[in-house]
Image: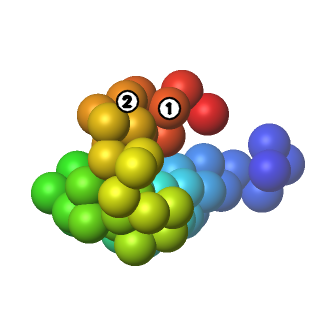
Amino acid sequence: MIAGKVYGKVRTMLRSITRAVLIPALLFLALAYFIKTNLITALYGPEFIPAAEPFLFYSFAQ
């Protein structure tokens, strides 16, 4: 990279890869926030509805 002086190309590539990954991830987390109760109920049953509140906290922690 240093010999070819392709810093601009590498920077552009990293930006495009980051955007390609970041936008779907943010959309998924926003969607999961709004359907977290339904998601927990469908996966684990109605007795685990109180577990829906810390769901996103643990999603971000990992």
Q: Residue at x 50, y 32 (%)?
A: 58
Of residues 25 and 52, which is closer to you in this image?
52
Percent coordinates x, y for residue 31 in the rendering: 22, 64
Asked if the residue at tag 1 contacts the one at tag 2, i.e. Cβ–Cβ closer than 8 Å, the answer is: yes
How far apart are labels 2 and 1 at the CA level? 6 Å
Percent coordinates x, y for residue 38 in the rendering: 26, 66
Q: Quadrant of residue 36?
A: bottom left
Q: Residue at x 32, y 47 (%)?
A: 49
Q: Residue at x 25, y 55 (%)?
A: 37
Q: In the image, is 29 to the left or to the right of 57?
A: left
Residue for badge 2: 54
Q: Quadrant of residue 27?
A: bottom left
Residue for badge 1: 58
Q: Residue at x 54, y 56 (%)?
A: 14
Of residues 27 and 32, which is closer to you in this image?
32
Q: In the image, is 21 to the left or to the right of 26?
A: right
Q: Amino acid at mark 1?
A: Tyr
Q: Quadrant of residue 19?
A: bottom left
* Residue 26 appearing in the image: no
The crowding category of the residue bearing disc 2, from other C-alpha atoms within 10 Å (few below 14, some 14 to 19, many at least 20), is: few
User: The C terminus appears in which quarter of the rendering?
Assistant: top right
Q: Residue furthest left?
A: 34
Mark 2 or 1: in front is 2
Q: Amino acid at mark 2?
A: Pro
Q: How many marks?
A: 2
Of residues 58 and 60, which is closer to you in this image?
58
Please tell me whether mark 2 sits on a helix, a strand or a loop: loop
